[in-house]
Amino acid sequence: MPSVRSLLLAAATLAAATTPDGAARSAQAQTAPSPGAAVSPLTPGATRPVERPGGTDFTLGHPRRRQGLWEIRSMASDQFGLPVTRYCVGDNTDNAAMHLDRAAGDKGSCKIGSFKRVGVSWVAETVCRDSRQTVISQSVASGDFRSEYRIDTLVFYSPPLPGNKREDKEAVTGRYLGACKPGQRAGDLEVPGMGTLNMTDGALRP
């Protein structure tokens, strides 16, 4: 299901780093966040304080969204006219293994890091390596995770892509809509025109 997969990769944070080629293709499609964004990705080895958002549960070792239906919007998807997706967050959707639709661990030639708290934000890094290139993606997640959040990602290429392209930027925003719809299951991702994909068990429904 390439079409569904490509849309999900654009809409759901850094799940695109499952393969080196997939990560590179997704990163090349990314666009810069709008000027004046509240949070910018970190540069390698740097940290930056941001304002404390209200409602964030800092007792957890990972970011956790409010239960209910969330609208997930990607700047890259907006550029290509792809539809906005909606995601049903349940009690255990954001857990120690799955952070904001991102499963940490080794995936092919990629090492996907979990989100770690830095100040009042959450920072994660993915590193993909093959025989020709290294792609490093750094993400900063901010917001209260009850009504809204934003993930800004900066992607570095080594060596640079053709045309001396050394980096890309992407931003994903989440907005709380209310309770999940009747019949929805936790982990259901609605892709308009394509159906519903459950991110937990991989089941696709019309």
Image (cartoon, grey):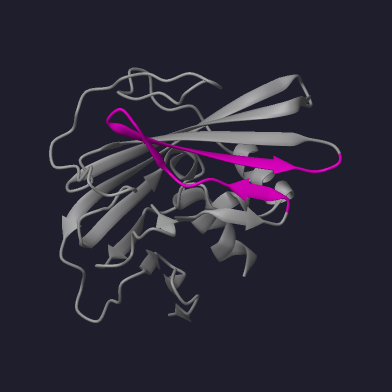
Quarter of the image where the C terminus is located? bottom left
Place of residue 176 in the rendered image (x, y in percent of width and height, measured from the top left): 20, 52
Q: Quadrant of residue 160?
A: top right
Where 48 sits versus 127, above or below? above
Residue 127 lies left or right of residue 62; in this view the side is right
Residue occupying the point 34% across, 25% down: 39
Residue 31 lies left or right of residue 191; in this view the side is right
Residue 127 in the magenta stretch? The answer is yes
Where 69 sits versus 76, above or below? below
Residue occupying the point 18% across, 48% down: 146
Where 32 sits versus 131, above or below? above
Q: Quadrant of residue 200?
A: bottom left
Place of residue 172 in the rendered image (x, y in percent of width and height, measured from the top left): 40, 41
Residue 162 lies left or right of residue 95; in this view the side is right
Q: Main secondary structure of the magenta part?
A: strand
Place of residue 177 in the rendered image (x, y in percent of width and height, measured from the top left): 18, 56
| Camera-side residue of 49 and 159 | 49
Residue occupying the point 51% across, 49% down: 10
Residue 99 in the magenta stretch? The answer is no
Place of residue 96 in the rendered image (x, y in percent of width and height, measured from the top left): 38, 58
**From which residue to which does the magenta span run?**
109-131
